[in-house]
Amino acid sequence: MNDALPNPPEPTALLSPAACVPGVFHKPTQVFESIARRPSWWMPFLFTMIVIYLFYFSVTAKVGWKQVYENNLRLAPKQAQQLENLTPEQRANSEKIAVSFTQGVWLGMPILTLLFAAIEAAVLLGTINFVFGGRAAFWQVYAVTWYAGLPGLLKFLLAILALMAGLDPEGFQINNPAGTNLGYYLNPTDTPKAFYTLASQVDLVMLWTLVLMGIGLSVVARTKRSSGLTAVFGWWILMVLIGVGASVAFS
C-alpha cells in the first residue's frame, strides 16, 4: 500500500506587471493569481494616465473646453434656465468658472483616479470579506481594480480616433465619448432622461470591466466566482439606479 501523499499542484507562473497588462485581456485568471501573490498597480495606472492625457489633448485641440461646457449644458435644462436669469456679466463669470472646473478635473485625473480606486477597493474588500467570507487584502483588491479597468481605456482610444477623424464638436459628449452603449446613439434632448441615462450606463466596455473585476475579486479573496461577480454587479446596479434617479432630479 502506498501511503505517499500526492504532490501539490505547482503554482502558475508569476507574471510581471508589464505582462499582466496584455494578459488581462486573454488570460485574466492567471493575471489575478499573480496579483494575489504579488499585488502591484503602478503599471495599469501608468497606461491609464497616458491614454487619459492623450484624450485630454485631443479634446483640447478638436473640441475646446468651452464647447464641452456648452454641450454639457444642453443636457441640463434646469441649469440652463437658471443661467438665463443672470445678468450677462454673471453668466460670463459662471461660464468661465465652469469651463475651468471641467478642464481642471481632467488635469487632476492622477489624484482623482487614485482616490476613487481606493474607495472602490475598500467597498469591494468589505463586501467580499464580510459578506462572502473572503480573505482578500486591500492592496490585492486595489490592484484588481486597476487591471480590471484597463478595457475602459478602449472607450477613450475610440473617442480619440473619432475626434481625429473629424467628429462634430457640437455632438461630442465628454461623459459618453464613444459608441459602446445605446445612449451614445440617442438624442439626449429628445429622449426621456431616465431612459437615456440607463442606456448610457449599460455599456459593453463597462460590462467587460465588471466581469473582470468579479473574477479578480474572487481569485484574490479565494471565494467562489459567483461571489465575486455578485459583489461587483450588486454595487454596480445600485450605483446605476442612483445615477438614473439623480439625472431625473437634477436635469
Image: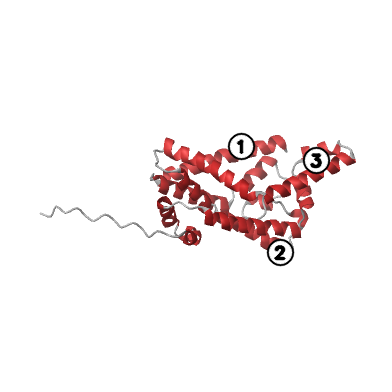
To which quarter of the image does residue 151 belong? bottom right
Q: Locate residue 180, reporting x and y percent.
A: 61, 55
Earlier along the polypeptide chain: callout 3 or callout 1? 3
Residue 189 visible in this rendered orientation of the protein: no
Asked if the residue under mark 1 is in contact with the one under mark 3, i.e. CB atoms within 8 Å, the reply is no
50 up-or-down from 240: above or below: below
Dot 3 crowding, Cα within 10 Å, few <14, some 14–19, many 20+ = some
- In the picture of the structure, the residue carrying the numbered disc 2 is 164
> Helix or strand or loop: what does disc 1 sit on?
helix
Earlier along the polypeptide chain: callout 2 or callout 3? 3
Left or right: where 173 falls relative to 211 = right
Q: Which mark is residue 80?
A: 3
**Which amino acid, mark 3?**
Ala
Q: Which residue is drawn at the image coordinates 58% and 39% (left, top)?
A: 239
Q: Locate residue 144, reporting x and y percent.
A: 48, 50
To which quarter of the image does residue 75 belong? top right
Asked if the residue under mark 2 is in contact with the one under mark 1, i.e. CB atoms within 8 Å, the reply is no
Residue 20 visible in this rendered orientation of the protein: yes
Dot 1 crowding, Cα within 10 Å, few <14, some 14–19, many 20+ = few
Left or right: where 83 falls relative to 59 = right
- In the picture of the structure, the residue carrying the numbered disc 1 is 242
Q: Locate residue 251, reporting x and y percent.
A: 73, 38
Q: Marks 2 and 3, how far apart in space?
A: 30 Å
> Helix or strand or loop: what does disc 2 sit on?
helix
**Which amino acid, mark 1?**
Ile
Q: Which residue is drawn at the image coordinates 58% and 54% (left, top)?
A: 152
Q: In the rendered image, which quarter contains the N terminus?
A: bottom left
